[in-house]
Image (cartoon, rainbow, N blue to C red):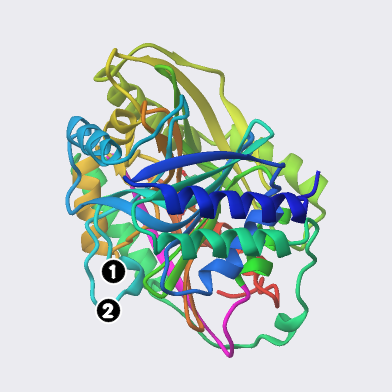
């Protein structure tokens, strides 16, 4: 169903009237005709061009998508805070608003991997955790779409009208623009080339031999200088059409945009039931090869690799250990394979019941960062990562998603991503290192993990090393 312009204009008027009458800060909810993800992508691209306001897009493949524009209120934590404190802060934040009926407001939530405060790295000036109530939130849940507006000042009406005006103008099947065809790469570099990468892996192996760690996830960045700014709408549409069943996310603020498409769920919580996964142990696929034959061989190699099974089992083990602190009835399901165009991953779904009073925030605090993005055990691995990686990771390998007032919600792990500022694109990828990791093979794996970003750029860069 497409959006009826007359209906929206009517809604817009109705909201303006209601908002003008609102005397105390309020959160209002309206039902909307179905919003496709494509429409939210178009809105994200248009709204993020306005550098004044934060814009947030997050979507899973299970029927939840949200677009948040503006920030009515936010809570930022310089260090990782205890879940009980965050929970209380969220309740206090929401208690400033009249919420009315039975709807539960949706808040955005994102966290960084580390306490990133490198002034040289624009993607890494992050607090640890941010929870925010968007001024305008369009979201779709199980095929129903809603508009949530948080009103505390009359000026917010401008932001609300902006979203509604754009919505009336968005065509449901917006085709991509052709302006970006001529984008050129002016420069390319990586922070860890194959020789520094290999040296870092040798250091990790020394720490593994000494018994201090069993696995460390090493990551690197690729920096691309373009001759013009990226068209974010086209980029997100390409990313979504090539990798359709993943988490798609984008955060635009402070003059930069962090964007990606991740196969990894950190946690999904509903009514005390928790779903998570171990995702680690990978075989990259080459672009040039016949995909069916190649996938068959790669699958055999992955399932027969004791190194990948070891890497994977450490992640299962670390998640189960973490869950024992906050959950009961922990069920480790059968091993499966996540089959993507660029790579195959071993995957084990894990389910549990959270202890009474626990919610998504406990899942975040205890599970993250898993051994799939940090290492095992967690803290010596994180120390090694900060010693070996030239700059903080910032949002890369952090988490992104949403939470409601009851602590239900969903978070993805921020992988297969890039930070974009002006004409610079920084692409991130990492690989789990164990005692028998081969630096060359791991480097190829990191290239394959960057491919979704490269191939979604207008010129489809594949061969960058
Ligand atoms: C760290 C990344 O991916 C993680 C590491 C994996 C591995 O080492 O096999 C697989 C999936 C992810 O959990 C990344 O994509 O940057």
Q: Which quarter of the image is occupied by the C terminus? A: bottom right
In the rendered image, the vertical position of residue 210 relative to residue 174, given as above or below: above
- Mark 2 vs mark 1, CA separation in Å: 9 Å
Residue matched to label 1: 391
Residue under the image location 48 percent in, 63 percent down:
159
Instruction: Residue 76: give x, y in percent of width and height.
Output: 24, 52
* Residue depicted at 68% across the width and 68% down the height: 234
78 to the left or right of 262: left
Rendered view: 176 above or below 202: below
Residue lying furthest top: 329
Q: Residue 460's quadrant in the figure?
A: bottom right
- Side (left or right) of 377 relative to 143: left
Count of numbered circles on the image:
2
Image side of residue 291 versus residue 323, left or right = right
126 over 328 or under it: above or below = below
Q: Position of residue 356 (x, y in %)?
A: 29, 12
- Does the magenta segment cover residue 227? yes
Q: Which residues are magenta?
A: 214-231
Give the number of the disc on residue 241.
none
Q: Nearer the viewer, residue 25 or 124?
A: 25
The residue at label 1 has a CB less than 8 Å from ligand 1 = no
Q: Residue at x 27, y 79 (%)?
A: 120
Callout 2 environment at 10 Å: few (<14), some (14 to 19), or many (20+)? few
Dot 2: what SS?
loop
User: On the image, numbered disc 2 is attached to which residue?
Assistant: 120
Residue 255 lies in the magenta stretch: no
Tell me if label 2 and label 1 are in contact, CB under 8 Å.
yes
| Residue 132 position (above or below residue 407) | below
Does the image show residue 440?
no
Residue at point 26%, 41% (across, down): 96
Secondary structure, magenta segment, majority class: strand
Q: Position of residue 60 (x, y in %)?
A: 58, 41
């Amino acid at each position: 169903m497409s959006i009826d312009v007359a209906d929206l204009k009517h809604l817009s008027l109705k909201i303006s009237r209601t908002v003008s009458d609102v005397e105390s800060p309020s959160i209002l909810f309206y039902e909307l005709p179905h919003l496709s993800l494509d429409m939210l992508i178009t809105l994200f691209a248009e709204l993020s061009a306005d550098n004044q306001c934060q814009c947030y897009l997050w979507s899973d493949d299970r029927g939840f998508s949200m677009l948040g524009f503006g920030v009515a209120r936010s809570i930022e934590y310089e260090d990782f805070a205890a879940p009980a404190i965050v929970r209380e802060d969220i309740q206090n934040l929401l208690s400033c608003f009249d919420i009315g009926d039975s709807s539960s407001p949706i808040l955005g939530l994102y966290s960084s991997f580390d306490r990133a405060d490198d002034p040289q790295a624009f993607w890494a000036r992050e607090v640890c955790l941010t929870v925010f109530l968007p001024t305008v939130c369009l979201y779709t849940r199980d095929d129903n779409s809603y508009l949530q507006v948080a009103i505390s000042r009359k000026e917010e009406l401008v932001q609300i009208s902006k979203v509604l005006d754009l919505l009336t103008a968005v065509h449901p099947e917006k085709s991509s623009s052709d302006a970006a065809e001529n984008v050129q790469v002016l420069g390319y570099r990586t922070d860890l080339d194959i020789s520094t990468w290999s040296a870092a892996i040798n250091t990790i192996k020394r720490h593994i031999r000494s018994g201090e760690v069993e696995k460390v996830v090493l990551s690197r960045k690729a920096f691309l200088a373009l001759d013009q700014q990226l068209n974010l709408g086209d980029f997100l549409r390409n990313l979504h059409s090539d990798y359709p069943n993943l988490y798609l996310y984008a955060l635009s603020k402070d003059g930069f945009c962090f964007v990606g498409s991740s196969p990894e769920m950190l946690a999904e919580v509903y009514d005390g039931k928790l779903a998570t996964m171990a995702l680690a142990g990978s075989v990259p696929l080459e672009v040039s090869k016949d995909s069916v034959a190649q996938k068959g061989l790669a699958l055999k190699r992955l399932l027969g690799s004791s190194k990948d099974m070891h890497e994977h089992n450490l992640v299962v083990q670390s998640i189960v250990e973490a869950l024992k602190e906050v959950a009961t009835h922990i069920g480790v399901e059968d091993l499966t394979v996540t089959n993507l165009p660029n790579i195959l991953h071993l995957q084990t779904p894990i389910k549990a019941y959270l202890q009474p009073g626990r919610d998504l925030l406990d899942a975040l605090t205890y599970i993250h960062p898993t051994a799939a993005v940090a290492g095992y055990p967690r803290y010596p691995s994180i120390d090694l990562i900060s010693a070996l990686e030239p700059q903080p990771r910032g949002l890369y390998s952090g988490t992104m998603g949403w939470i409601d007032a009851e602590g239900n919600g969903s978070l993805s792990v921020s992988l297969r991503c890039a930070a974009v500022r002006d004409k610079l694109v920084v692409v991130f990828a990492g690989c789990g290192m164990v005692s028998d990791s081969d630096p060359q093979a791991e480097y190829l794996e990191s290239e394959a993990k960057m491919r979704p970003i490269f191939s979604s750029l207008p010129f489809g860069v594949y061969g960058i090393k």
